[in-house]
């Protein structure tokens, strides 16, 4: 059996972005930290970090944030960047501000371009992140592309062949699946995550992607009715769907 991890309250809360250890000491003294409704007045106290802690611990009357190992599904809006440090609007701005101070940091699992919307996962679980983006796992990503020009009818075969070489690269793309929706709209499923891959694939056919939206990742879809900028935490069953 694995041992339940323990942590000092100040270290735990500080790693979750609530503030510095001395701020946590002051908050504890002021009665702002409770466990099972009992005040923890000494922030150096060691507690067991059990999965139910967010239901049992309150910080200023609010339930504790999710512990390490969170996976967030976000419907990324257009115009936001998947970066921790670029100028302009970042996808991290959508989440609670203190989550920017969490250690380990929350990162996007792969990236969507600034001008791509749709299903984006974020996590503080480095192992999971690497499993999802590993080319060996072949996790399928499905994009809806709106095109500037009508499809010619040859794209599906070209993408499926696994021989398409993108400009400036020396290894052909893995086979990808095209589902034609209309003359100028298609769903494209790829298992790799090369730079601007979908836009460059259509560019290689002489077309141009005018709008790009990711709808699915593995067996996970964007929940029906989820608006741009909305997000939710995934449970273990939903996380498992990524690899289906
Ligand atoms: N392919 C692209 O061209 N852009 C994305 O954001 C994702 C896949």
Image (tube, rainbow, N blue to C red):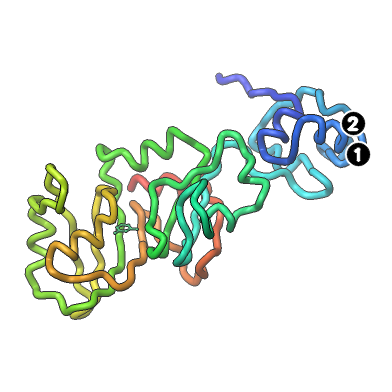
Q: Which residue is mark 1?
A: 31
Q: Is residue 214 left or right of residue 19?
A: left
On residue 203, the disc is none
Say which of 75 and 217 sits in front.
Answer: 75
Identity of the residue drawn at 81% across and 24% down: 45
Ligand 1 shows up in which quadrant of the image? bottom left
Q: Is residue 99 left or right of residue 181?
A: right
Say which of 15 and 113 sits in front.
Answer: 113
Identity of the residue drawn at 24% across and 74% down: 147
Identity of the residue drawn at 12% across and 43% down: 170
Q: Position of residue 212 (x, y in %)?
A: 33, 67
Callout 1: SS: loop
Tell which circle, 2 or 1, labels the residue nearer the N-terminal end. Answer: 1
Callout 2: SS: loop
Q: Which residue is mark 2?
A: 41
Q: Position of residue 54 (x, y in %)?
A: 70, 42
Identity of the residue drawn at 83% across and 46% down: 60
Q: Are marks 2 and 1 in contact (CB under 8 Å)?
A: yes
């Amino acid at each position: 059996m694995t041992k339940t991890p323990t942590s000092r309250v100040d270290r735990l809360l500080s790693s979750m972005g609530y503030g510095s250890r001395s701020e946590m000491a002051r908050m504890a003294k002021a009665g702002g930290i409770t466990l099972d409704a009992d005040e923890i007045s000494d922030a150096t106290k060691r507690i067991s970090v059990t999965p139910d802690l967010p239901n049992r611990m309150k910080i200023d009357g609010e339930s504790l944030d999710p512990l390490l190992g969170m996976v967030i599904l976000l419907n990324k809006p257009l115009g936001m960047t998947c970066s921790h440090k670029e100028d302009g609007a970042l996808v991290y701005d959508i989440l609670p501000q203190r989550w920017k101070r969490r250690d380990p940091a929350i990162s996007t699992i792969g990236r969507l371009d600034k001008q791509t919307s749709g299903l984006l996962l974020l996590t503080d679980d480095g192992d999971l992140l690497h499993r999802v983006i590993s080319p060996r796992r072949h996790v399928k990503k499905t994009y809806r592309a709106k095109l500037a020009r009508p499809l010619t009818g040859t794209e599906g075969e070209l993408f499926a062949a696994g021989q398409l070489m993108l400009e400036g690269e020396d290894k052909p793309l893995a086979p990808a699946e095209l589902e034609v929706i209309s003359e100028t709209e298609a769903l494209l499923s790829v298992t790799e995550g090369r730079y601007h891959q979908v836009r460059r694939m259509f560019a290689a056919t002489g077309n141009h992607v005018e709008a790009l939206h990711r709808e699915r990742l593995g067996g996970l879809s964007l929940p029906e009715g989820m608006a741009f900028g909305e997000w939710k935490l995934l449970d273990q069953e939903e996380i498992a769907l990524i690899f289906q």
